[in-house]
């Protein structure tokens, strides 16, 4: 079974580039150049130097002792929350800004939900002196205010998306519209493993540093590079794909992807895509998405802005359909409780997105021997308001 992209841009039945004609030249320019640029020696050198000196990689693989006691397994946390700007998103924006420079682009656009991808994009634009415009849903601008402030201070223009559910899907629509109108000088830094080919593959490659490091670190901790389980939350799916990437062909490693059930999968207020969705096209690729009988996208809901998305990337759809990955979901309440639990057991305040992955540990059964890696995709500073209100602190 091939779990990776084929020469046509597909992962099994999913992927491709379903784009308006106006976007064709941009996407084609990327498609024909991305691997050449990424595999170039100079690119690799500059990418890894920045990941080390600027982002602070490798991020630690931390054996969480009190969490391990609670679950009767060795629980390791891959600390993407310790990266510069506070999440995994910076791995991808460093890669894409270097690529945009090599394509001669002067203007950068991005969409953002939780604001972490927006901040990571604004950061690399400041670093390289490029203009930056970030689209963000109006609701997300309110619930992730600290990240909006950071983007502004970094010199980015934050444009509110006011249609639909005023969240990530709508911000992505606006960013695509901008790209159609500015085809020549602009690069669109997509923030997850979504969008037309080659984005899902390209973003997965940049994020694959997560599992590349994890394998080496596991050998130091356990003597083997194979854990029993790896877990990650899934919005579009970039931290999960980074966490899964180098384990995909290790068939004895179980891959668990945790989606946001919101208020519950049956409540009409959910973002549990694989549970509620069907195959279709969203944001330029064939995947699985939440849609009505006649193919209209259903507005998603999650307390977590980064998981509040009605689709998943095409590689995830393929892992789901082939049963290579197990796709599950947890509710807002379960995630928020898991966030508090990690904070009080380990002294680490996680992003509400990452707390979804942690929450699933409550539903697993262990024998005391298992090695389990959870991708701690980001830190919770941006979510303090939501946590404090929820717990009445
Ligand atoms: C900390 C954090 N984790 C996870 C996500 C979800 O994105 P993805 O599924 O692409 O990793 C986000 C998105 O904003 C995020 O900020």
Image (tube, rainbow, N blue to C red):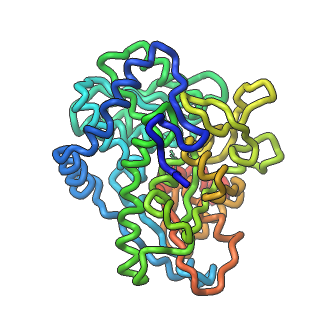
Of the 4 image quadrants, the one containing the N terminus is bottom right
Name the residue rendered at 65%, 37% in the picture. Answer: 310
Name the residue rendered at 60%, 55% in the picture. Answer: 387
Q: Would you say 53 lies left or right of 383 here?
A: left
Position above or below: 72 against 250: below
Q: Residue furthest left?
A: 42
The picture quadrant where one finds residue 184 is top left
The picture quadrant where one finds residue 329 is bottom right
Q: Would you say 205 lies left or right of 130 here?
A: right
Position above or below: 377 against 318: below
Residue 170 at x, y percent in the picture: 58, 27
Residue 303 at x, y percent in the picture: 65, 47
Q: Residue furthest bottom?
A: 368
Residue 261 at x, y percent in the picture: 72, 50
Name the residue rendered at 78%, 48% in the picture. Answer: 265
Q: Nearer the viewer, residue 378 or 337?
A: 378
Q: Is residue 299 visible?
A: yes
Q: Nearer the viewer, residue 12 or 134?
A: 12
Q: Would you say 47 lies left or right of 4 here?
A: left
Q: Is residue 339 visible?
A: no
Q: Nearer the viewer, residue 35 or 119?
A: 35
Name the residue rendered at 58%, 50% in the picture. Answer: 234
The picture quadrant where one finds residue 363 is bottom right
Of the 4 image quadrants, the one containing the C terminus is bottom right
Q: Give the total number of marks visible in the rendering.
A: 0
Residue 202 at x, y percent in the picture: 40, 42
């Amino acid at each position: 079974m091939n779990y990776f992209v084929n020469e046509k841009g597909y992962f099994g039945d999913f992927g491709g580039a379903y784009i308006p004609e106006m976007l064709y030249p941009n996407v084609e320019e990327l498609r024909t150049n991305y691997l050449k640029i990424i595999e170039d020696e100079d690119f690799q050198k500059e990418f890894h130097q920045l990941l080390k000196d600027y982002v602070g990689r490798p991020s630690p693989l931390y054996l969480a002792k009190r969490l391990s006691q609670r679950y009767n397994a060795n629980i390791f946390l891959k600390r993407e929350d310790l990266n510069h700007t506070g999440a995994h998103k910076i791995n991808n924006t460093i890669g894409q800004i270097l690529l945009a420079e090599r394509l001669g682009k002067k203007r950068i656009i991005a969409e953002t939900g939780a604001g972490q991808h927006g901040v990571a994009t604004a950061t690399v634009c400041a670093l390289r002196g490029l203009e930056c415009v970030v689209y963000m849903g109006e609701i997300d601008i309110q619930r992730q205010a600290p990240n909006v402030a950071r983007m502004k201070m970094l010199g980015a223009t934050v444009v509110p998306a006011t249609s639909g559910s005023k969240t990530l899907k709508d911000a992505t629509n606006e960013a695509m519209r901008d790209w159609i109108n500015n085809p020549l000088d602009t690069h669109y830094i997509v923030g997850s493993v979504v969008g037309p080919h080659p984005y899902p593959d390209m973003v997965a490659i940049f994020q694959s540093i997560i599992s590349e490091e994890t394998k080496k670190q596991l050998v130091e901790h356990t003597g083997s590079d194979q854990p029993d389980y790896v877990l990650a939350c899934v919005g579009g799916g970039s931290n999960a794909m980074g966490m899964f990437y180098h384990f995909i062909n290790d068939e004895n490693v179980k891959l668990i992807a945790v989606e946001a059930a919101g208020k519950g999968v049956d409540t009409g207020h959910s973002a549990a895509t694989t549970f509620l969705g069907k195959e279709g096209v969203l944001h330029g690729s064939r995947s699985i998405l939440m849609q009505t009988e006649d193919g209209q996208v259903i507005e998603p809901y999650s307390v977590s802005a980064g998981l509040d998305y009605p689709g998943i990337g095409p590689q995830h759809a393929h892992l789901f359909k082939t049963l290579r990955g197990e796709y599950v979901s947890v509710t807002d309440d379960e995630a928020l409780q898991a966030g508090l639990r990690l904070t009080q057991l380990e002294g680490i305040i996680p992003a509400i997105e990452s707390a979804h992955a942690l929450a699933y540990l409550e539903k697993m059964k262990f024998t005391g021997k298992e090695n389990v890696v959870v991708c701690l995709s980001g830190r919770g500073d941006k979510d303090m308001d939501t946590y404090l209100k929820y717990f009445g602190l």
